[in-house]
C-alpha cells in the first residue's frame, strides 16, 4: 500500500512546476503596469502642483510654520494660556514680524534703486582700471565692456523693479498663509477624536501614534534647518554691518531663505553681497574680508553645526536632492526650490515610519 503512494509523489512535481511557469510573464506585466501608472501619477501631480500653486504653496508654508510654533504653543498652554489665547499671541507676533520685515525689505529695495547710478559710476571706474589688463585695443575693450555694463545694469534695474511688484504679492500670500495657519491649528484639536471615531479606538490610536512620530521627526528637522538658516543670516548680517556693506539686512534675509536650498542656495546668496562689497568700496581688502568671512560662516554651519544638531539619520541621497531641486524649481520656481528639500525629507520621514515602506526610505538615504 505504501509503494503506490510513494510512486505517485514524483508525478505531482511536474504538474506544480507547470502551473507556476506561466506566472512569470504575468508578474512582469503587472510590474510594468505599476511603473506606468506611477509615471502617469507623477506627471499628473506635477500638472496639478503647477495649476494649484496659489493654493498649495501657502498651505505648505503654513504647515511648516505650524511645525515650528507647535512646541512653543504647547509650552504656553502648559503655563496657563488657553489654546485660543496662545494662537492669538503667535499670530499677533507673526503679523508684527511680517510688518517690520516688509518695511525693511521694501525700503532696502527702493534705496538700491536710488543708489544704482552711484554703483554704475563706481563700476565704470573699476572697468577703466581693468582695461589695461585686457589683451585688446583700448577702444575695442571700452566698447565691449560698455555693452556688458549696460546689459547688466538694465537687467539689474528690471529685476529690482520686478522685486518691488512681487513684494506686494508676497505680502498677500503671507496673509493667506496666516489664514491657513489659523485653521490648521484649530483642526489639530479635534483631529484625534475624529480619527478614533472613524477607525475605532485601537486602530485609531495606532495611526495616531504613527502620525505623532512622523510629526515629531518633521518638526525636529524643520526646527534645526530654520535655526541654522537663522544663524547663517544673523552671522552674515554682523559681518556685512561691521564692514559697512549696503543693505545688510536684505542680504541677511536672502541668505536665511536661500540656506534652505542646498549646494547652490548659500553660494548664490553670498555671491551677491560679495560682489557689491567690491563695487562699493575702494579698498580691496574689504571685499576680500567679506568674501572670506561669509564663506567661512557657510562652511562652519554646513560642515560642523548642522550635522551636529540634525545628525545623520535624516540624511537623503544627494542625487535625490538635486532631482528634487530640479523638479520643484521647474514647477514653482524659487519658492519650490526653497521647499524642495523640506518636502523630500518629509516624504522620507513618512516612509520611514510606516513598516511597509521602510525599504523605500532606506533607498532614499545617503548612508
Image: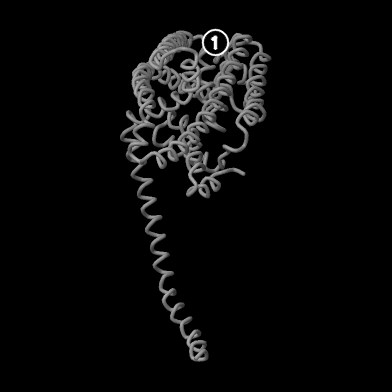
- Farthest left residue in view: 51
Q: Answer few, some or many: residues within 10 Å of disc 1's Cα (few below 14, many 20 plus, some between 14 and 19).
A: some
Question: Residue 149 at x, y = what percent?
Answer: 50, 21
Q: Secondary structure at mark 1?
A: loop
Residue in the foreground of this view, choosing between 131 and 362: 362
Residue behind mark 1: 246
Question: Residue 133 at x, y = what percent?
Answer: 65, 23
Residue 42 to residue 298: above or below: below
Residue 229 to residue 239: above or below: below
Q: Is residue 351 among what the camera can see? A: yes
Horizontally, residue 54 falls left or right of residue 104, namely left
Residue in the foreground of this view, choosing between 156 and 263: 263
Question: Going 48% across and 32% down the picture, which residue do you hit?
Answer: 215
Residue 23 to residue 175: above or below: below
Question: Residue 175 at x, y = what percent?
Answer: 35, 18
Color theme of the render? one colour
- If the image is split into quadrants, where does the C terminus sit? top right
Question: Going 35% across and 28% down the picture, which residue do you hit?
Answer: 190
Q: Is residue 109 among what the camera can see? A: no
- Farthest front residue in view: 1
Horizontally, residue 300 falls left or right of residue 214, namely right
Question: Going 59% across and 15% down the picture, which residue do you hit?
Answer: 277
Question: Residue 341 at x, y = what percent?
Answer: 50, 34
Question: Going 51% across and 9% down the picture, which residue do you hit?
Answer: 118
Horizontally, residue 261 falls left or right of residue 238, namely left
Q: How many marks?
A: 1
Residue in the foreground of this view, choosing between 44 and 19: 19
Amino acid at each position: 500500500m505504501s509503494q503506490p503512494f510513494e510512486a505517485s509523489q514524483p508525478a505531482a512535481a511536474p504538474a506544480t512546476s507547470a502551473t507556476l511557469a506561466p506566472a512569470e510573464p504575468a508578474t512582469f506585466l503587472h510590474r510594468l503596469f505599476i511603473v506606468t501608472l506611477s509615471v502617469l501619477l507623477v506627471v499628473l501631480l506635477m500638472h496639478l502642483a503647477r495649476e494649484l500653486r496659489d493654493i498649495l504653496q501657502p498651505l505648505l508654508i503654513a504647515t511648516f510654520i505650524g511645525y515650528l510654533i507647535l512646541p512653543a504653543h504647547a509650552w504656553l498652554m502648559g503655563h496657563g494660556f488657553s489654546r485660543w489665547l496662545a494662537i492669538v499671541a503667535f499670530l499677533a507676533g507673526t503679523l508684527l514680524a511680517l510688518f517690520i520685515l516688509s518695511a525693511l525689505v521694501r525700503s532696502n529695495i527702493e534705496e538700491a534703486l536710488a543708489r544704482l547710478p552711484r554703483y554704475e559710476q563706481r563700476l565704470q571706474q573699476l572697468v577703466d582700471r581693468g582695461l589695461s589688463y585686457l589683451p585688446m585695443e583700448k577702444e575695442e575693450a571700452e566698447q565691449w565692456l560698455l555693452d556688458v555694463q549696460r546689459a547688466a545694469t538694465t537687467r539689474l534695474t528690471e529685476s529690482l523693479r520686478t522685486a518691488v511688484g512681487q513684494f506686494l504679492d508676497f505680502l498677500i500670500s503671507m496673509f493667506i498663509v496666516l489664514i491657513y495657519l489659523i485653521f490648521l491649528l484649530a483642526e489639530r484639536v479635534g483631529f484625534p477624536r475624529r480619527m478614533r471615531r472613524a477607525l475605532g479606538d485601537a486602530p485609531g490610536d495606532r495611526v495616531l501614534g504613527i502620525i505623532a512620530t512622523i510629526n515629531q521627526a518633521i518638526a525636529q528637522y524643520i526646527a534645526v534647518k530654520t535655526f541654522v538658516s537663522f544663524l547663517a543670516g544673523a552671522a552674515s548680517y554682523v559681518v556685512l554691518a561691521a564692514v559697512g556693506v549696503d543693505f545688510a539686512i536684505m542680504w541677511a534675509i536672502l541668505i536665511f531663505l536661500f540656506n534652505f536650498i542646498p549646494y547652490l542656495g548659500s553660494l548664490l546668496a553670498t555671491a551677491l553681497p560679495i560682489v557689491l562689497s567690491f563695487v562699493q568700496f575702494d579698498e580691496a581688502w574689504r571685499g576680500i574680508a567679506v568674501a572670506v568671512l561669509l564663506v567661512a560662516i557657510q562652511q562652519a554651519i554646513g560642515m560642523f553645526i548642522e550635522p551636529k544638531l540634525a545628525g545623520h539619520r535624516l540624511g537623503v541621497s544627494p542625487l535625490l536632492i538635486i532631482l528634487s531641486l530640479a523638479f520643484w524649481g521647474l514647477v514653482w520656481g524659487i519658492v519650490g526650490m526653497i521647499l524642495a528639500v523640506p518636502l523630500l525629507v518629509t516624504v522620507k520621514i513618512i516612509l520611514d515610519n510606516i513598516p511597509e515602506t521602510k525599504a523605500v526610505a532606506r533607498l532614499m538615504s545617503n548612508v
